Amino acid sequence: MKICKSLEDLRQAKKLIHGKHGFVPTMGALHAGHFSLVKKAREENDFVSVSIFVNPTQFNQASDLENYPSSLEEDLAALKDLGVDLVFLPDFSTLYPDEYRFKISENDFSKKLCGHHRPGHFDGVLTVVIKLFHLMGAERAYFGEKDFQQLSLIRGMVEAFFMPIEIIAVPTVRETTGLALSSRNSRLSPEARDKASLLYEKLRSKSSDQQVLADLQKAGFDVDYVETIENRRFVAASIEGVRLIDNEVLP
Ligand code: AMP
């Protein structure tokens, strides 16, 4: 497994690419949700690359960025076990030689749901993703349905800019309680983790969005939104200051 930090390392390592290339972008602190993307990429491609980069431009709160978990050694060992060929570990100046002077913006869906509550979040996401796509040059990229709004905006960007890459969606991996795996879950106390499973229970319930919002507030969540769009319900809520998001197609 080649580990590349600079653009020059990456340029050299890309000479090893053969056949179909599948790419999995991540922010590290990897868990079974990320691994399901990597496994699918491994099954479907001859060459698999993963990036680990905690992208500052998509964080609208400095404390969230500062507290974002990291487990690089474990991540690299796991990716090696999964048969990954290349890991890209850029730093900010490598990915942003322009210091974020240029960005990609979307004017509609990116302003709703998480975009409404985290101004600029999706500009940061789309900008880092387009940079990574150009650098990696893969034919396919893998994204989790857990971040459905992100997935949908990335698909839209690829279409809008005629980008020669196929976006593959991977179902959300959950704990047995239903809680969607997330790097941020590691910051929850055992009590909050128990309570967090209520998010999925309520997400799938037959109650109205308003009722779900009220139920979550009553249970101690600080709720950003509960909203159903095209029969998919989206929820974002914080507990112990840890922001959790989830979504599910309604029955
Ligand atoms: P992140 O490191 O949070 O940026 O996530 C990297 C990729 O992993 C994104 O495409 C996420 O949607 C995906 N992902 C994160 N958590 C899960 C999960 N529980 N199940 C499936 N995919 C996930």
Image (cartoon, helix red, strand yellow):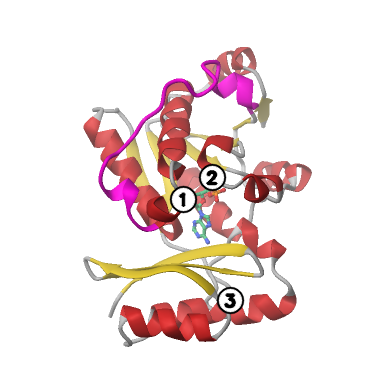
Q: Position of residue 65 (x, y in %)?
A: 64, 45
Mark 3 Cα-neighbour bin, 10 Å: few <14, some 14–19, many ≥20: many
Residue under circle 1? Answer: 118
Residue under circle 3? Answer: 196
Q: Quadrant of the N terminus?
A: top right
Q: Quadrant of the C terminus?
A: bottom left
**Between 65 and 156, the one nearer to me in the picture:** 65
Local SS, label 2: loop
Vertical position of residue 219 compared to residue 232: above or below: below
Vertical position of residue 10 compared to residue 234: above or below: above
| Circles 1 and 2 in contact, beta carbons < 8 Å | yes
Q: Position of residue 138 (x, y in %)?
A: 42, 29
The span shown in magenta is: 90-113
Instruction: Indicate which label's residue lies in the foreground, 3 or 1.
Output: 1
Residue shown at 46%/36% (left/top)? 124
Q: What's the mark number on residue 60?
A: 2
Q: Position of residue 209 (x, y in %)?
A: 33, 78
Residue 21 in view of the camera:
no
